[in-house]
Amino acid sequence: MEKGKPLILISNDDGYQAKGIQELVRMVRDYGDVLVCAPEGPRSGMSCAFSATIPLTLMLRHQESGVQVWSCNGTPVDCVKMALSNLCDHRPDLVIGGINHGDNASVNAHYSGTMGVTLEGCMKYIPSVAFSLCDQRPDADFQPLEPYVRQIIRLVLSEGLPKGICLNVNFPLTEGGCYNGVRVCRMSQGTWYNETTKFHHPRGYDYWWMIGHYNNDEPTADDTDRWALEHGYVAITPTTIDLTAYEAIRMVENWNI
């Protein structure tokens, strides 16, 4: 990696071979040196989990001028931690999660390994952004995202982000890849239900798949990420790592525990 150039650390939860992360590298590599450290396979739903009971390994998968691609056997957060501790010769200027195959809007952000990458970077006080597309297909078309991804990365590299704030960016799946614009919005409230589906194995035991259905609990609120996606807008949600409910502090204080 070349000193003096911005260093961009990229990871995901779909694995280092996923099309989304490969397309992301292509989109941003001219902004600086790119270091990829991503799981060796899919790790969806890992959130901020890290490995405390298994040893971790790193493997160099690809190297060319300005780009290194490493895989790790751990979680997305493991990948960020391993890269920062063992692969970066200086502090990254930016951490990016994605591009995820599937949306991470609403409460999905709490479960997302892509957001885990971004939150980990944010907790290290590094400007961090997550990108997700509402298309789970392995061969999803990421081309329409490129001008938006590049513009956001350019602005974050030049302007930075406030301490403790990262960006959760979600792209809708639209006809022809055309967007109605960009909305900066809040996380919507939603609920997953019927989350486990039971099956019976021919060998005589029951097993369950985690499938579930999502319900938008505020469908008419037009200031949310879910509304934006449903109406063809790119949704940008500034997200904080501080989980304190400040408005409830006085209430709990009044309990006089």
Image (cartoon, rainbow, N blue to C red):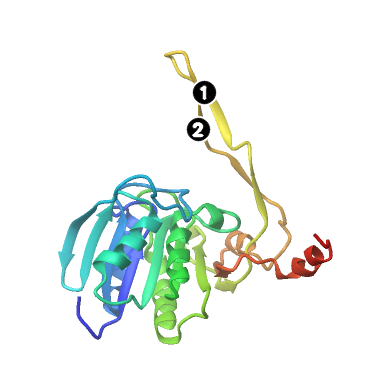
Q: Residue drawn at (48%, 65%), measured in percent from left and top?
A: 119
Q: Residue drawn at (49%, 80%), measured in percent from left and top?
A: 161
Q: Residues within 10 Å of mark 1 (few under 14, many from 20)?
A: few
Quarter of the picture holding the N terminus:
bottom left
Q: Residue drawn at (51%, 78%), measured in percent from left and top?
A: 163
For marks 1 and 2, the one nearer the N-term is: 1
Viewer-proximal residue among 69 and 120: 120
Query: For the residues marked 1 and 2, what is the alpha-carbon distance in whole angstroms?
Result: 8 Å
Q: In the rendering, at what x and y percent does residue 251 appear? A: 81, 65
112 up-or-down from 131: above or below: above
Q: Is residue 251 left or right of residue 151?
A: right
Do the CB atoms of the residues marked 1 and 2 lie less than 8 Å apart?
yes
Q: In the rendering, at what x and y percent does residue 55 appear? A: 29, 48
Q: Which residue is mark 2?
A: 209
Residue 156 shows in this picture: yes
Q: Which residue is mark 1?
A: 199
Kind of residue indicated by mark 2: Trp
Q: Residue furthest front?
A: 257
Marking on residue 179: none
Residue 22 shows in this picture: no
Element class at badge 2: strand
Q: Is residue 186 left or right of residue 48?
A: right
